Image: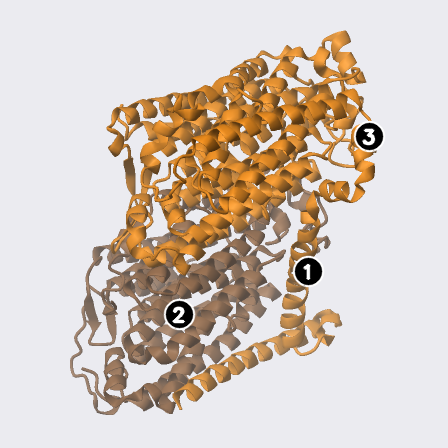
Amino acid sequence: MSISLTPWLVLACPLVGMLTIALLGKKLSPRAAGTIGTLAIALAFVFAVLTLIKLQALPSNARVETTSLWDLVNVDGVKIQLGLYVDPLSTFMILVVTGVSTLIHLYSAGYMQTDEGYVRYFAYLNFFVFSMLLLVLAGNLVLLIIGWAFVGAASYMLVSYWYRRDTATAAGIKAFVINVIGDIGLVLGTLFLFKTMGVLDYGQLFSGAHTAFEKDAPELVIAMLLILVGAFAKSAQIPFQTWLPDAMEGPTPVSSLIHAATMVTAGVYLIGRLHVLFEWAPTAAAVGAIVGALTLLIAGSIGLVMTDLKRVIAYSTMSQIGYMIMGVSAAAYVGGFFHMMSHAFFKALLFMAAGSVISAMGGNQSLNNMSGFRKAMPFTFACFLAGGFALSAFPLFSGFFSKDTLLFEVGARGGWYWALYVAGYVGAAFTVFYTWRMIFRAFWGEPCKEAQVVIDTGHAYHPAEHTNPHTGDEDDPSTQEVEDSEVGFPGKEHKYAETTWQMRYAMIPLAILAVIAGVIQLPFGVTNVISDFLQPTFADTIVEYMPDNSGLEAFGLLISSVIAIVSLACAYWIWVRKPGTSAAIQARLPWLHKLFINKWYFDDFYSIFVVRPVVWIGQWASDSFERVVINGAIIGGTSGLVKAGSAAVRAIQTGMIRSYAALVIGGLSIVLLYFLVRGL
Amino acid sequence: MSMPLASTVPAAPYIDWAGLSPLLALLGGAIIVLIVGLAGPRGIRTKLVPLLSLATFGVALGCVIALWGQNLVLIEDALQLDPLTLILMLVICGGGVVAVLLAWRDQAAEEIAHGEFFALMLLASAGMFVLVSSRDIVMTFVGLELLSLPLYILCASRVREERSLESGLKYLIIGSVGSATVLYGFALLYGATGQTGYSDIASAISSNGLATDPLFLTAVAMCTVGFAFKASLAPFHQWTPDVYEGAPTPVTAFMSVATKAAAFGVIIRLFDVALRPAIEAWRPIWIAIALITMVVGNVGALRQPSMKRMLAYSSVAQAGYVLVGFVLVTDLGVQAICSYLILYSFGNLAAFAVVIARERETGEGDNISALRGLGTSRPALAIAMTISMLSLAGIPATAGFMGKLRLVEAAAAGDYAWLVAVLVVLSVISLAYYLPVVATMWRGETQPGTDAASGVPVLAGGAPEADATGARAGWELTAVAVLLAAAVIVFGIIPQPVFNLVASAARGLGLS
């Protein structure tokens, strides 16, 4: 198999899987659908590995392969091919996407076993992976936009998967709308590039950028800023971040798939992919880096106070993606993608473990109700711990090395990048606090009644009535909307890792990777797997680093270790040794808590300044545009509206024609006037 | 060749009969259909007549294909058969084939007799041929009227239904205003230039420096308004929703594809050839019309409970997108228009096929509530409708996306990127009226008695449960919808054949 074939097979597997599941539909048994879905992605992973092997066989200065099936457009020198671009970066991405997705599919096969929509679920899931792979492998900006739009559509379908929950459909629509705003940015940015350069292929874009534009030329900066809007919307960066926490409405494996491992990394990939253009437009790149830094701080601070377990992890995702966006925008490519990889491992793992806990809680997601799961669910606890250590960048865990590589590379830029460097370490302290707050509250202490049920019976707790945790008071299920157990929460039977082998086998490899994945890229050049592998893609970088930074690297590692250990000790003190401390802090600083718990008021801001005006305009359009302007003003007074009976109808109709004709004449007069005035 | 009319006595005009064959086929077919329609047995009227009409469109299509790639003068300088004519005839005859299938069992054909109904449709198509091939303002006007008059009658062909009669009457009166405007414009144009042939007009403008002449500019203004009306471009579109809604749906479908193609054909030829030297005078006004049309179409389509009204506004919006290609006045722009007209017609016709099917099956008319629960009851129709809505909205991997892509690309190459920005933003707004249709079909069960979109009770005689037992709408509707939807997907993934088809579109126009 040649390298021009394997990437197509990577794409074909999930597509075929999706079509098979969708077309056979209800004829498939749930088990068969899960198996087909999982195998399709596993096969894609195999082909991704083959692609890697073939790519590595090429000489390192020629590791770019473009392959195309046919021309989508081939007119007057403009050529848009249905083509793929295989280089170390896209290969790296497909490996991570297919690898982690395979495990998530496997986990889903257990977790969603008794859900009524099981078959539909796997069709969506495969479609999602297909879209993401298309986005990553696309050989030109048009194909990238197609994949980009598909990912948005797939996320809508998956977030609204439990469609009888009004909160879920609302969240899906929100995700879709914000994604579409990003799509507009991406399309317009592409258009600006095309207008000047006349090409859309990556190869031609990269080689022609330096001649087509001056460095930091305004047109290029505008184009790249528009493209950044697309990246921010997909990666949930400020100010487009509000959809991500709401998207936790989807089933937990979906959160794991689209909000940790794949979708949100699309923006990071896009910036890395177009790094030649971003480096040539440093103003735009700086905007990206600053927005990433702001996001990592703001999202981290919100994560400190959220009480919904999944939302804490969601804000953590947003914050970690902030690191990556900051990193790749500041030309910290190795660190950015290294962190993306280790984040994919430990975040998918954390979501899986959280799903297991939520199952055992009977669907309740509030940290206020959880405690003492350490003894009830030892396996889940161990996995959560592995993920938690990695996320909080505890020394020697994968997140430690990846975050430090990233921050080191940012710091090595010198100058004002030092501010970003410091922000990164402040965010690191936030990370430790929210991670361990989650762990201490859910797993330490006396077992709550749900945990006791697990210890006593070996089965998950089942509430008498299922309720939607996103309605009413999140701590008190009796205030929440009652819902049909078959669509609201996975099935009649709740599955958790200790009793479900698919979930367990999906979590084990991720737990191992979360712990040890750091060894492939160790500091001081001890191991260089990622930097060597990505080197051909980023060989053309024109960014300059400070000379001699080994001191900085050592300093970063030291600071990072201190932050991780000291913050962990503080967290232990606050939540385990002196459980009243956090309430006391909250009482001392109520305004800060209020700001964080209201998510820095972004949602309210949008509601007042965007959503309400738009709704109002829509209402106005339907009320006045049609009824008043056309039927009222044009018909000749609103009196016609109230008249009834056939005579009146006829009267309106003749009036209407006369007024239509009058409009034609009126329009004609205007056009005529224009021509004559212009001609004189 | 053409001189001032008064002194021209063409002794033996040159006529290319082979080149005229599509026109002859349509006219001959119309006469045969009309005569056969007089036959007594009902079976002949209801089966043979549509079949003959189908055959006529088929023969005309065959002639078009046989003439493909040629560039012929048909009748002296009056008619010209060039690639643009052939491409548009392909759209028109293709639209005709689909319209005949849609109208086959329609109440409208029943009410004014099958012979008349289908003969009028063929005559209108003949008018479209004259219109898109004319190179002389006299022939243009003949074509315009030959196209319009049958359509007035077709709109009113459900003679027992008030809405349809009203639609026909309204179209007639307003259409006459439009025609009169065009005619007045042509008269002034002749007055200003002393010529009737397109190329003669063009040379008269440049040699006499007429581009700023008030008489000439008045003529251009009137032509602009008249044709903007015919192509239902805002602000001259007001008749469109009313007429589309009231006319029998197969006629609406035919108009939305064929009439639109013909109108753009003549606009391109008149402005890009005859009035080309005055381009600086008319381009700004057409840009303004394009902007207004895109905005009005997309805003008007929001929250329309009537599918036909929604599709009417949608077609106004689509016409606005096509204008973006027109104002460029480049070879690429004309190609983009032609590919857009072809690619857009698939999704558009599929949508109408589904609307007709539901009209016949539910008794709820074209209200969006007729589509409720279609996903479970008629999955084939629901899938076709979903694809067509996605295509109209321009979602990737559909034909509609590729059509828009060509327009975007042509506009960017022609230095009108800002127009594209408007187009992109407005097509995103269009999701707000296309996607609810999709949601309605796949969500939930029918709620009898009320229209969920507006909460208004369904009109008398529209109780769905009473009609639920009614026969299915006919296999041909499902077949048309599914085939067209398949075409949407195929050309959304492999669009190059269409692009190759239209590659020579502007060859007869002399554009750069």
Chain A colour? Answer: orange
Q: Nearer the viewer, mark 1 or mark 3?
A: 3
Q: Above or below — where is A419 with respect to A340? A: below
In the drawing, what numbered circle is on residue A200? none
Q: Residues within 10 Å of mark 3 (few under 14, many from 20)?
A: some
Q: Are marks 2 and 3 on the same chain?
A: no
In the drawing, what numbered circle is on residue B147? 2
Q: Quadrant of the N terminus of chain A?
A: top left
- The residue singled out by tag 1 in the image is A616
- In terms of depth relative to the viewer, which is nearer, A353 or A398? A398
Q: Above or below — where is B76 with respect to B424? A: below
- In terms of depth relative to the viewer, which is nearer, A599 or A555? A555
Q: Residue at x 16, y 83 (%)?
A: B11
Q: Position of residue B1 (x, y in %)?
A: 18, 82
Q: Residue at x 60, y 32 (%)?
A: A428
User: In the rendered structure, which amino acid carries the disc numbered 1?
Assistant: Trp
Chain to which the residue tagged by mark 1 belongs: A
Where disc 2 sits, the SS reads helix
The earlier-in-sequence mark between 1 and 3 is 3
User: In the rendered structure, which amino acid carries the disc numbered 2?
Assistant: Leu
- What separation in Å lies between label 2 and label 3 (alpha carbons)? 70 Å
- What separation in Å lies between label 1 and label 3 (alpha carbons)? 35 Å
In the drawing, what numbered circle is on residue A476? 3
Chain to which the residue tagged by mark 3 belongs: A
Q: Above or below — where is B15 with respect to A406? A: below
Chain B colour? Answer: brown
